[in-house]
Image (cartoon, coloured by chain):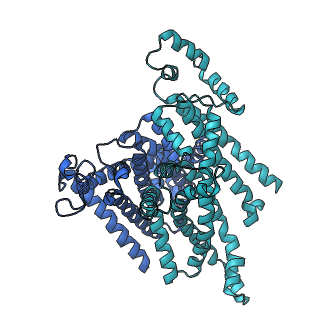
Amino acid sequence: MIRFILKRLLMAVPTVVIVSITVFALIRFIPGDPAALMLGDMADPKQIEAMRVTLGLDQSMLQQFFTWVGHMLTGDFGRSIVTDEPVLHLVISRFLVSAQIVFLAVVIASLIAVPAGVIAAWKQNSITDLALVGIATILLSIPTFWMGLLFLLFFGLKLGWLPVLGYVSVSENLTAGLLYLALPVMTLFIHEMGVIIRMARASTLEVLRLDYITHARAKGLSESAVLWKHAFKNAFGPTWTMIGLILGNLLGGIAVIETVFTVPGLGRLLVDGIFQRDYPVIQGCLLVVALSYVLVNLVVDLLYPLFDPRVVAE
Amino acid sequence: MKRLTFNGVIGGSLVAFLLIAAGLGLFWTPRDPMALNFLARLAPPGAGHILGTDEFGRDVLSRLMVGARASVWIGFLTVAFAAICGTLIGLISGYARGWVDGMIMAINNALLAFPGILLALGLLAVFGANQYGIIVALGIAYTPSMARVVRGAVLSLREREFIEASKVMGNSQLYTMFRHILPNCLAPITVLSTSMFGWAILSESALSFLGLGVPPPAPTWGNMLASGRPFIEQAVWLGFFPGLCIALTLLGINLLGDALRDKLDPRMRGLR
């Protein structure tokens, strides 16, 4: 068990290193001199040169990289070029907003979609199965920003049940906060249900074909015991991994949902950063999302043996 | 067997419809998609404009057809980019093995550690937000998945007898690689390319919706939704039809992808 954990932790190290190199390199590839950009059009060459020294741009790439890593490790993500706020503070506060939406959506989607997928597999090729797979395929084909827009139109503008613009944090006002969260969470979980139903169905089908299921049935176990006690345990593994991937992917793609519902989250921060060429902010967002994606997948993998102890032995 | 055909037929027709609309949009649209007409601002769907007009009085149907062309073209080039680069990387990595494989796969896996759309957003900051920026950004973001699938296929193929035979016969490594290994990888490449075409169209419309895609006034489904958004209360059709186009296209590609997967490669079932 300990060997499994250590091995998985060690595997994450090169990923983290290459992720940071990629983020560092991406920002350096952006055309234009960051020092000149930060000072604006009116700066004279001397000022720009001084700024380059302050930013460490006169050093070699390797030196710059290690200085940068050092800063990141001590929590110094720099300051936003536009608002002069410290990037770390900005990124963390926005991250929390996005994370609560994504987390709620994935939990709700999994609670509904995993059993639905298992039932679809159990009733393979029945009307129930065809209907569930059909619905799942339709759900996953509807882009979240369109679904969001339609919900906004229907629940917000036509019925007037839910707020349309703005955002109130749950910590400020619980009920109002939840009302603002309702539409983004609903949009995301309905969309992701499609993906999870199909995954849960596929992995359950795979398991239901195995000999030990036939054996369990031959022992005279009830169908529900076969399904939930025997099949489900082994079928859940791949779905669990998929749920982890979805969690990370949603964090990366949350910008569209935040745009539809005017939620001040991390995705919106990143997109605004790209519009305003605010490099420290872009860099901070990319790094935080990519590292949390690595972290989520690490946690998912470390918890995997709880569902399927076989991976530890391998 | 029955459902397989059903998926294939529905998916195939939806995709064919998209391609026809996009192809037709190259030569002919009911009206000029760029012509402003302030007298017909926000006109509801009806006789003059089948799907209504937008906030500048432009014909929505014509703009949707031109948008289809943009989506298909960007999707196609993105998939071509990712398929060619990914296949080459996967072939080399799987065939060479050893430290070359180790190096390539370490970088590949780290790139896979970025959610695709996030990597694309980062790359768009580098290449700039325009049609070609999107193609390169999404192409690079999708290359690692293709490389991984091709490498997996190559690894299992290179131990087979006919590859051994090709080597014994004195064929060069390159000849063996392209003449014998590559054709046998085409099934997974096709299946993944179909899904990627859908991802690319979805990502392109999402990026255009964010304002990071093809800049207006050129119409894409994504930027039509974004620019119609302030008016959706008076003009529901502006928020409805572009999204419906994206959804039907994705549905078609997903169904077609399922049918292809069942037919070509039963092992790939369950891959997103």
Res A200 → quadrant: bottom right
Q: Is residue A194 left or right of residue A86?
A: left
Residue A39, visible in the rendered structure:
yes
Q: Residue B87 versus residue B9: which sits nearer the camera?
A: B9
The blue-tinted chain is B
Give the image location of residue B113, x and y in percent: 60, 47
Quadrant in which the C terminus of chain A is drawn: bottom right
| Chain with cyan colouring | A
Q: Residue furthest top?
A: A46
In percent of the image, x 69 and y 56: which residue is there?
A: A300
* Depicted A228 relative to depicted A89: above or below: below
Along the viewing direction, whichever of B236 and A146 lies nearer the viewer? B236
Q: Is residue A215 visible?
A: no
Residue toward you, B194 or B147 = B194
B42 versus A12 height, above or below: below
Position of residue B7 relative to residue B103, above or below, is below
Where is the N terminus of chain A found, in terms of image quarters? bottom right
Residue extending furthest toward the right: A2
- Look at the picture and state if B72 lies above or below A80: below
